[in-house]
């Protein structure tokens, strides 16, 4: 005859059914467990737990063994260190070579651009000089007085000396004196400083 238990007793009964095997194992191990013993629950079908292994202390090697070991591997370690350094140097050299190649390409590109610029400026200067050579002296003097003094002096130096003299004669005295000073310092072969 089964009697039905109140609801609160069902939980206790389930807990006791679960805890009974664990308590049985604990008591079968000789009662109270020692501090270094651990309680392990063994599940049905599981492999038995291995006994804990005791670690054995190795004897401290004496200094002569250490020195022999170090002397035996010293050459191999040095060779390996040299090989690593050589490999690193090769990588650095490859990087430097690559950068130098890129720099050479840029330099060649810059030289090409500079030559094209010089050719263009020479043509432009010749064209500008020709324009001023064909102008009337009073009009050329008026225009050159407005232009940058260095540019005006360069143009006058490329003109025929008679034409340049007539243009300077038509200019204001201060502007003519400034241009004459620039042309004289440019004509010197020795640096005045």
Image (cartoon, grey):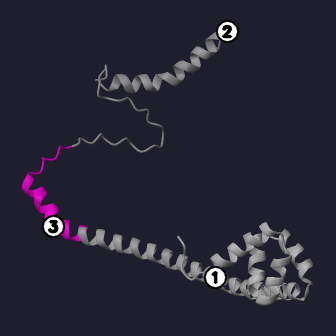
Q: To which residue does mark 2 refer?
A: 6
Residue extent of the magenta highlight: 56-77
Q: Are marks 3 and 2 in contact (CB under 8 Å)?
A: no
Q: Nearer the viewer, mark 3 or mark 1?
A: 1
85 and 13: which is toward the camera = 85
Q: Which quarter of the rendering shows the N terminus?
A: top right
Locate residue 128: give its quadrant.
bottom right
Secondary structure at badge 3 equals: helix
Residue 81 pos. (x, y %): 29, 68
| Residues tagged 3 and 1 counted as in contact (Cβ below 8 A) | no
Point 79% across, 89% down: residue: 162
Within 10 angstroms of label 1, few (less than 14), some, or many (20 or more) residues? few
Q: Is residue 136 above or below residue 40?
A: below
- Residue drawn where x is 54% and y is 76% of the image: 191
Report, in whole angstroms, how far the alpha carbon at label 3 lies from the one at label 1. 79 Å
Q: Can residue 5 be seen in the rendering of this structure?
A: no
Instruction: Identify the residue under disc 3.
Output: 72
Q: Indicate the secondary structure of the residue bearing disc 2.
A: loop
The image shows residue 140 at horizontal and vertical percentages of: 88, 79
Q: Position of residue 94 (x, y in %)?
A: 48, 78
Instruction: Please identify the quarter of the rendering in which residue 187 is found.
Output: bottom right
Q: Residue at x 23, y 70 (%)?
A: 76
Residue 27, labelled with which disc? none
Q: Is residue 105 left or right of residue 128?
A: left
Left or right position of 12 against 25: right
Above or below, 6 against 103 in this view is above
Counting other residues with Cα less than 10 Å from the Cα at mark 3, is it few (<14), some (14-19), or many (20 or more)? few
Q: Nearer the viewer, residue 170 or 27?
A: 170
Quickly name the residue at label 1. 187
User: In the rendering, at what x and y percent does residue 105 appear?
Assistant: 61, 83
């Amino acid at each position: 005859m089964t009697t039905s238990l109140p609801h609160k007793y069902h939980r206790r009964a389930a807990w006791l059914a679960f805890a009974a095997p664990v308590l049985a194992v604990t008591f079968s191990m000789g009662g109270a467990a020692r501090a270094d013993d651990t309680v392990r629950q063994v599940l049905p079908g599981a492999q038995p737990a291995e006994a804990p292994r005791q670690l054995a202390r190795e004897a401290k090697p004496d200094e002569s063994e250490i020195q022999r070991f170090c002397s035996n591997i010293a050459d191999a370690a040095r060779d390996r260190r040299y090989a690593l350094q050589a490999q690193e140097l090769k990588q650095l050299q490859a990087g430097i070579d690559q950068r130098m190649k890129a720099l050479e390409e840029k330099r060649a590109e810059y030289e090409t651009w500079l030559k094209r610029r010089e050719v263009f400026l020479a043509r432009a200067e010749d064209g500008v000089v020709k324009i001023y050579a064909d102008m009337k002296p009073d009009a050329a003097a008026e225009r050159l007085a407005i232009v940058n003094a260095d540019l005006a002096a360069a143009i006058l130096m490329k003109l025929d000396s008679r034409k340049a003299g007539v243009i300077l004669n038509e200019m204001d005295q201060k502007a003519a004196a400034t241009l004459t000073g620039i042309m004289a310092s440019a004509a010197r072969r020795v640096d005045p400083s």
